[in-house]
Image: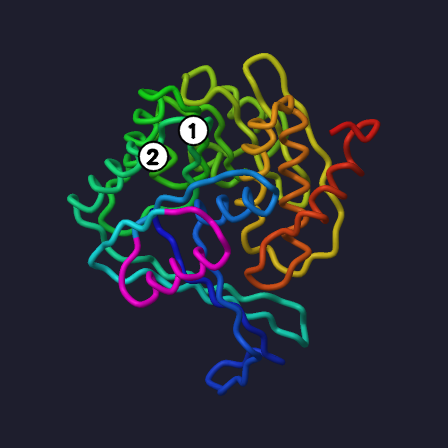
Amino acid sequence: MNPALDIATSTEVVIPTEKMRCGSPRYDPGGGGINVARVVKTLGGAAFAVFPAGGPSGQSLEGLLARQGVPHIRIPVEGVTRESFTVDEQRSGQQYRFVLPGPSLIETEQRTCLENLAGYLAGARFLVASGSLPPGVRADFFQDVADLAAGQGVRFILDTSGEALRLTRRGVYLLKPSVRELRECVGRELSSEAEQIQAARDLITEKRAEVVVVSLGAKGALLVTERRYERFAPIEVPIRSAVGAGDSMVAAIALGLVRGMELQQAVRFGMAAGAATLMTPGTELCRRDDVEKLYLEQSPNGNT
């Protein structure tokens, strides 16, 4: 619901008030759901992206998706699609990310998004909603999306935060919060792994989700279901950029499930995609060879 034209570049050092000469920019279609669709395609799967976009940046975003061969439908809106700007500081290796709020969507535009989405759900195995909501969109919008998916027998995967997460109270198959997002959702500190597992299980008990995958960043991930949980160790890779790592993880989990992987192996596949994205510069996402290599390295007995 809040796509972006992602721009990435680098400069020697970031200094306040100084004019900083940058390297050649890289442009990518961005935003959570769009990144998910891009990664699914990279990994050999089939995804269809549905998103609102407007203005010159929205047209550029759509053109980039078309050039990458990602099937999609752009829902025209009056507002101008946001741009996100990422700068790598060469001297320190630090990365600076500037994320704008996005255009305000009026109620009729929101309804058009839902109507278009409903029209493209036939035959889908999973519906993934990933990212933030732009201004003007009511905070419980993803609940409408969850109900729409349930009505058509499609499993719904959600990766969002804040009020949008708190107000989605039913119909989610798999929820993928970070620890911070989970803490904000349940409204209490989660200092230990036991508390994190209990918070995830509470969401399952309340029927808000069937499965919760908690991203722990550098500490790995937790998979929690009604009856069991599993902790996954992080995959150690050289980190160049964190842009899109969470979206890559979600994409590979969904694709793994479509391909018939057990839930545990799908999460491993997702972690491999997230780690592979950490290895690429700027706003570039994972590369298929890296994902498959990392997945095989961490899978017991090399099972696929």
The chief SS type of the magenta part is helix
Q: Marks 2 and 1: in contact by CB < 8 Å?
A: yes
Q: Is residue 150 above or below residue 112?
A: above
Task: Please tell me whether mark 1 sits on a helix, a strand or a loop.
Answer: loop
Q: Residues within 10 Å of mark 1 (few under 14, many from 20)?
A: some
What amino acid does circle 1 point to?
Ala
Q: Can you see residue 250?
A: no
Depth check, front residue: 78 or 238: 78
Percent position of residue 59, x then y: 33, 63
Depth check, front residue: 159 or 152: 152
Q: Looking at this rendering, what residue extends furthest in the left direction?
A: 108
Q: Which residues are magenta?
A: 53-72
Q: Residues within 10 Å of mark 2 (few under 14, many from 20)?
A: few
Residue under the point 31% across and 24% down: 147
Percent position of residue 223, x then y: 61, 26
Depth check, front residue: 118 or 265: 118
- Would residue 285 be found to the left or right of residue 137 on screen? right
Q: Can you see residue 76?
A: yes
Q: Which mark is residue 152?
A: none
Reply yes or no: does residue 55 show up in magenta: yes
Task: Please tell me whether mark 2 sits on a helix, a strand or a loop.
Answer: loop
- Residue carrying label 2: 120
Residue under the point 27% across and 59% down: 54
- Would residue 211 be found to the left or right of residue 129 on screen? right
Query: CA gap, disc 1 to disc 2?
Result: 8 Å
- Find residue 220 and report its image quarter: top right
Reply yes or no: does residue 148 show up in magenta: no
Q: Which mark is residue 124?
A: 1
Q: Is residue 225 above or below residue 186?
A: above
